[in-house]
Image (cartoon, rainbow, N blue to C red):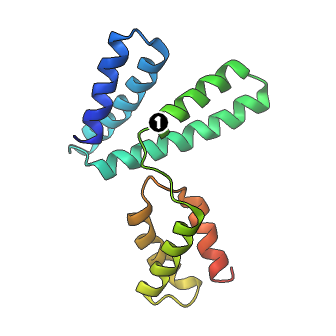
Amino acid sequence: MSLKDRIQDDMKTAMRAKEKERLGAIRLILAAIKQREVDERIVLTDSQVLAVLEKMIKQRRESLAQYQSAGRADLAAQESFEIDLIQSYLPAPLSEAEIDALIASAIAATGAQTMRDMGKVMALIREQAQGRADMTTLSARVKTRFGG
């Protein structure tokens, strides 16, 4: 079963259980997926759906920070709920040791020596860590590996 099918099944379950908040969040996810499919005239693969989910989480984290700084606990709670729901569709996150091993193997595989080679390393890491780690954090760790 594809990730998109799983999300659609969860929407049906939420409808039957009359879980309004969960249903609304799942509909937002499906709308974002459908929007990308319509824009690009394709059917998204699981990895492309993961990219959409990661983008949604990033947007919600930014909104959450703004709501918290503005003192809007009600809106912050809604964003937190949506972040948790979206994360439930992502694969299990990588551990610190797995991230270090992934970075080391990517550097070895690309033969990277300096910061100029960082693009090659990140391209390889992005394929393997899609949906399992924050790319901004990984990028920062690769930079420190190169002494940047």
- Based on the displayed image, in which of its 4 quarters is residue 4 positioned? top left
Image point (78%, 32%), residue name: 69
Q: Is residue 28 left or right of residue 65?
A: left
Image point (38%, 65%), residue name: 127
Given residues 114 and 93, the one toward you in this image is 93
Q: Which image quarter holds the N terminus?
A: top left
Asked which secondary structure carries label 1, the reply is helix
Classed neighbour count for the residue bearing mark 1: other residues with Cα under 10 Å, few (<14), some (14–19), many (≥20)? many
Q: Where's residue 23, x and y in %?
A: 41, 18
Q: Where's residue 111, x and y in %?
A: 45, 90
Q: Is residue 14 left or right of residue 138?
A: left
Image point (40%, 65%), residue name: 128
Q: Is residue 47 left or right of residue 111?
A: left
The residue that label 1 is drawn on is 86
The kind of residue tagged 1 is Ile
Q: Where's residue 123, x and y in %?
A: 42, 71
Above or below 43: residue 145: below
Q: Is residue 7 left or right of residue 144?
A: left
The tally of labels here is 1
Above or below 34: residue 96: below
Above or below 74: residue 45: below
Q: Which image quarter holds the C terminus?
A: bottom right
Given residues 40 and 61, the one toward you in this image is 61
Q: Where's residue 112, x and y in %?
A: 50, 87
Above or below 122: residue 82: above
- Based on the displayed image, in which of its 4 quarters is residue 73 positioned? top right
Given residues 63 and 47, the one toward you in this image is 47
